[in-house]
């Protein structure tokens, strides 16, 4: 760990201490005002105009200099007021796979109209207006690695109305994102996906007919009765019962997890019953959205340290 | 490459920095509600913003319009045109070579215009050129802000030329526009919002500005700055009778004056500025103290002293106390009514009984002078001899005439002068503003015995030469006579009031003799406009002067009102320098003390606590008044709510035969009619939609206001469209 990293860590700790939790109105004590470079230029301008007024004994130059100074003062207050008391809440994405981006919904509410509020986090940013005291925008943050990731510290800032000063506050979301492994489809996965299907046998219900449905499946009786053309849907019985095994995959741990992730997705969409065997934990066989979520979460939370080299069997 | 970035603006807006619009705003999709993005992405400026900057430039340039070279306007248009074509992607970016060439071109043009670049005009022109050319390389938000900052400086520089009311108003417009473009740059979503924010900023900052203006300590100039070259008034320190150009015919203001105590009568308003004591046979010129001191090898202190009281006549009693509001001029002349005795600031007191400032004035400024109203009673070290000198040769007829008159008056100086004046008062001498030119070497002879027509300088010169020929010390005094008295009690003295008369040294003091009084007494009483002969020359240099309209009653009143306003502005605001500040501040302090005392006396109890209580009470009263006002405003707004609007529309529709059915809800009524009223249909539909949203949806204050405004607008549209069709359907 270098000096830069240490400094970064210290700065991060410091920001955490200054940060405001989510869903809390931004208090005065946690709102900071910093001059911008343009603000510094403005100060120089005022100084130059005052000197101009003094040296030329020019009253209008005095007036303009004082007015610009007063404008800066008022701007200080209005910038501060633009950010004071806003609340930030987050809408976390349902699922994020590593290698894609986590689209974080940021909802900002402010009680009154606010303008040009910037939200920054993890290298991206967006600007939003709150014309009725409500605004929403999306931060697309890159999700590089699998695992449990804390939502980064968010920075809310505003330079409205003149850009002379910057009001800023840090928002500590204190929430975590679970990032699933990046799905990696190997040949085997692909082979397992296709294959002779079983006939769908059990009548499961009706759905609205679409062009291309087999005429044999159309519910003609329903049509004559209601005038709505429907298609009969039959449920497909589970085609396979499979175990997805960490030990049967190849490559380094992350690679194996990626492969397993892809297989989970494939088997789920095929409607298979599948279970997951990871070193140190086993997910019993099951199917459906819940099984999928549990499997993916197990993959996301898996700690490769648990997979001791002795348990790895190279085939 | 940058061009590509510019062109990609639209795509960049879709990605990366996006502005989160709120639901209803986006969903309505109205043109009014659509958010106009100022910045295509975080960096590149859009055409809208560039237009804003360009308009700002035009407004700032307008402040300089009277003084700047005209081609700068062309430059502004050229730069804007280049950027316009570039946005249409027909031209490449202005490269470094083009920009350097443009700056070099501006420098060359300025050099051609002024002959030098170091003068103040050249510097101002350069600033304007840089300000205009900066638009060529304005690509992102930072550049745009720099343009605005330069604009502020350029606005200030315009105050070097003028600080009048019109300039102040123009500068206010320009500054408001510049602030507005800064608001745009910070992310305003529409012009209404930008202007509202600008108005708030300017209004809220105005009190602080006023406070600073009143209290900020005023210092003298810290170092010397290059000054703007100014034209001087019609008054010269050299007169040559016969040169027509010597008479100023412009109505430009020379100075304004207000008197403490007695005001002078018209015949007393002789403002002495210069004495011309050196005559070379053709022209009278001023003997400056420095050359005079070295010629007579005497110390300079015998001829001029810097003081705030006259060292030459320390025991004189003042008749007039004049507060002068002087116009900027490139020469430091100071007018005084008679001999100056004391002044509010240090001045150069000359031994000829005139005043000079320490430096030329670059701005209008106030000066109070006490003076006697009479010619001085001292002659100085140069003595009567200097004032009797004539060239050895020349003007023989005049000399002969003086000889003859001197003998006729039997050596009595007064009788001699009276006979000369009597001569002037008789025909064929006449007073005219456009006399024939005098061309011979003996101009005084030519005037006295040939043309016999002229104005003040001709007569003054002739009288002085006659007096000197008879051995009476005499000199010509150049200054002003008269002034227009404003109903408010101050006088305006203009260039055309310039006058010349004679002072002769008799009985131990200088005596004023004005030959014009003998030939044209109405000039003394009524001013130069009273002279009928040659009056086409009056105001000949000011073809558009409002003074030409002085006979049209209401126009003259308007002119006087404007002058009063201008005078108050100049005296109260522009003249607010050191002295005025200390006076106002002490008055303010006294008033505050009085108010504090009043509060303390008013309330039972003693001292500070009671006063504080009173202050708190006053604050409470003010706060409640404010609350009442706010409530009143809210009531007023509610009176204009959607129900009232729609009821009015329904009543109007009823008159057109399109009224609601019994029990029909308003929205349904409007929708039903929409299908009948072809042109007004969409507007009616929209009305119904806004009405429903306003009444049944939970809207924030901002959107409700927005919709109410739109509803009102659509209702107007419905009426317009239905009216245009004439008769109602159904």
Image: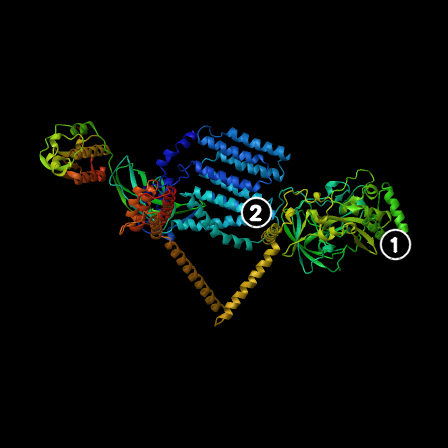
Quadrant that contains the N terminus of chain B = top left
Look at the picture and state if B104 lies above or below B680. Answer: above
Residues A74 and A263: in front is A74
Look at the picture and state if B478 lies above or below B15. Answer: below
Specify the subunit that label 1 lies on. B
Colour mapping used in the image: rainbow
- Left or right of A52: which side holds B729? left
Residues B196 and A8: in front is B196
Q: Position of residue A83 (x, y in %)?
A: 38, 49
* Circle number at residue B166: 2
Residue ranking furthest to the left: A201
* Circle number at residue B412: 1
At 54% from the left and 50% from the top, the residue drawn is A63
Mark 1 vs mark 2: which is more N-terminal? 2
Disc 1, SS: loop
At 38% from the left and 34% from the top, the residue drawn is B10
**Crowding at label 1, few (<14), some or many (≥20) Cα neighbours within 10 Å?**
few
**Crowding at label 2, few (<14), some or many (≥20) Cα neighbours within 10 Å?**
few
Q: Position of residue A198 (x, y in %)?
A: 10, 30
Look at the picture and state if A79 lies above or below B14. Answer: below
Residues A156 and A128: in front is A128
Quadrant that contains the C terminus of chain B = top left
Q: Position of residue B636 (x, y in %)?
A: 39, 56
């Amino acid at each position: 760990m270098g000096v830069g990293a240490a400094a970064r860590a210290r700065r991060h700790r410091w920001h955490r201490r200054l940060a405001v939790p989510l869903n809390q109105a931004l208090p005065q004590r946690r709102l900071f005002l910093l001059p911008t470079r343009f603000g510094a230029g403005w100060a120089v301008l005022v100084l130059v105009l005052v000197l101009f007024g003094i040296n030329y004994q020019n009253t209008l130059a005095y007036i303009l200099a004082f007015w610009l100074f007063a404008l800066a003062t008022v701007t200080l207050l209005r910038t501060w007021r633009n950010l004071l008391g806003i609340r930030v809440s987050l809408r976390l994405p349902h699922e994020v796979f590593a290698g894609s981006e986590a689209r974080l919904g940021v909802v900002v509410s402010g009680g009154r109209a606010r303008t040009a509020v910037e939200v920054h986090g993890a290298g991206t940013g967006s600007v939003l207006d709150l014309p009725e005291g409500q605004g929403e925008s999306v931060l697309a943050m890159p999700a590089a690695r699998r695992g449990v990731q804390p939502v980064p510290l968010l920075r809310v800032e505003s330079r409205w109305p003149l850009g002379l000063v910057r009001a800023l506050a840090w928002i500590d979301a204190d929430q975590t994102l679970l990032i699933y492994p990046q799905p990696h489809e190997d040949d085997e996965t692909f082979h397992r996906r296709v294959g002779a299907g079983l006939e769908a046998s059990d009548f499961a219900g009706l759905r609205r007919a679409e062009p291309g449905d087999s005429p044999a499946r159309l519910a003609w009786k329903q049509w004559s009765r209601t005038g709505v053309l429907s298609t009969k849907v039959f449920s497909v019985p589970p085609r396979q019962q499979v175990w997805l095994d960490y030990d049967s995959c190849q490559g380094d741990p992350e690679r194996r997890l990626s492969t397993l992730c892809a297989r989970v997705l494939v088997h789920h969409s095929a409607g298979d019953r599948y279970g997951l065997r990871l070193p140190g934990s086993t997910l019993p066989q099951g199917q459906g959205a819940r099984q999928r979520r549990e499997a993916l979460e197990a993959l996301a939370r898996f700690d490769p340290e648990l997979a001791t080299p002795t348990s790895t069997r190279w085939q | 490459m940058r061009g590509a970035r510019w062109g990609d603006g639209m795509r960049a807006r879709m990605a990366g920095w996006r502005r989160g619009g709120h639901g209803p705003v986006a969903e309505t999709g109205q043109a009014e509600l659509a958010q106009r993005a100022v910045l295509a992405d975080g960096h590149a400026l859009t055409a809208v913003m560039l237009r804003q900057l360009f308009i700002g430039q035009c407004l700032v340039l307008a402040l300089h319009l009277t003084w700047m070279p005209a081609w700068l306007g062309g430059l502004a248009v050229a730069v804007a045109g280049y950027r316009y074509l570039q946005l249409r992607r027909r031209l490449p970016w202005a490269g470094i070579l083009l920009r350097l060439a443009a700056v070099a071109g501006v420098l060359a043009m300025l050099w051609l215009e002024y002959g030098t670049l170091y003068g103040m005009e050249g510097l101002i022109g350069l600033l304007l050129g840089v300000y205009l050319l900066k638009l060529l390389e304005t690509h992102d938000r930072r550049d745009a802000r720099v343009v605005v900052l330069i604009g502020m400086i350029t606005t200030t520089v315009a105050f070097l030329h003028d600080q009048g009311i019109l300039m102040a108003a123009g500068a206010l417009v320009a500054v408001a526009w510049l602030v507005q473009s800064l608001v745009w740059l910070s992310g305003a979503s529409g012009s209404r919002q930008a202007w509202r924010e600008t108005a708030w900023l300017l209004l809220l900052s105005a009190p602080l500005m006023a406070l600073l203006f009143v209290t900020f300590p005023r210092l003298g100039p810290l170092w010397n700055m290059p000054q703007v070259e100014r034209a001087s008034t019609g008054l010269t320190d050299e007169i040559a009778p016969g040169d027509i150009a010597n008479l100023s015919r412009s109505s430009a203001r020379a100075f304004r004056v207000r008197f403490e105590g007695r005001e002078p009568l018209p015949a007393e308003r002789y403002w002495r500025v210069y004495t011309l004591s050196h005559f070379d046979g053709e022209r009278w010129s001023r003997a400056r103290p420095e050359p005079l001191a070295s010629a007579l090898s005497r110390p300079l202190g015998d001829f001029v002293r810097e003081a705030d009281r006259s060292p030459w006549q320390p025991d004189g009693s003042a008749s007039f106390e004049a507060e002068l509001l002087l116009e900027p001029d490139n020469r430091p002349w100071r007018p005084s009514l008679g001999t100056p005795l004391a002044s509010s600031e240090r001045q150069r007191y000359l031994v000829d009984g005139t005043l000079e400032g320490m430096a030329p004035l670059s701005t209008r400024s106030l000066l109070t002078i006490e003076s006697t109203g009479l010619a001085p009673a001292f002659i100085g070290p140069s003595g009567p001899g200097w004032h009797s000198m004539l060239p050895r040769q020349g003007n023989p007829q005049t000399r002969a005439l003086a000889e003859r008159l001197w003998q006729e008056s039997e050596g009595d100086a007064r009788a001699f002068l009276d006979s000369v004046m009597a001569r002037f008062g008789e025909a064929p001498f006449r007073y005219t503003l456009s006399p024939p030119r005098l061309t011979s070497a003996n101009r005084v002879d030519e005037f006295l015995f040939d043309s016999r027509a002229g104005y003040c300088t001709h007569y003054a010169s002739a009288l002085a030469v006659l007096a000197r020929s008879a051995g009476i010390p005499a000199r010509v005094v150049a200054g002003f006579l008269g002034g227009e008295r404003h109903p408010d009690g101050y006088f305006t003295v203009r260039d055309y009031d310039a006058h010349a008369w004679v002072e002769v040294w008799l009985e131990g003091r200088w005596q004023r003799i004005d030959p014009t009084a003998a030939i044209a007494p109405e000039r003394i009483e009524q001013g130069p406009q009273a002279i009928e002969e040659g009056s086409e020359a009056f105001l000949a240099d000011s073809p558009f002067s409002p003074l030409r309209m002085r006979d049209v009653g209401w126009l003259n009143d308007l002119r006087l009102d404007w002058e009063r306003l201008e005078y108050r502005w100049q005296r109260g605001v522009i003249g607010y320098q050191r002295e005025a500040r200390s006076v106002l501040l002490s008055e303010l302090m006294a008033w505050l003390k009085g108010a504090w005392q009043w509060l303390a006396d008013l309330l039972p109890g003693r001292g500070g606590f009671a006063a504080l209580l009173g202050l708190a009470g006053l604050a409470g009263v003010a706060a409640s008044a404010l609350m009442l006002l706010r409530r009143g405003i809210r009531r007023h707004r509610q009176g204009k709510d959607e129900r009232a609007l729609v009821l009015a529309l329904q009543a109007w529709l009823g008159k057109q035969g399109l009224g609601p059915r019994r029990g029909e809800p308003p929205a349904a009524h409007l929708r039903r009619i929409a299908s009948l009223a072809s042109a007004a249909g969409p507007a009616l539909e929209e009305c119904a939609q806004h009405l429903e949203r306003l009444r049944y949806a939970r809207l924030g204050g901002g959107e409700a206001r927005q919709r109410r405004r739109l509803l009102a607008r659509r209702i107007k549209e419905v009426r317009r469209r239905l009216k245009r069709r004439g008769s109602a359907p159904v």
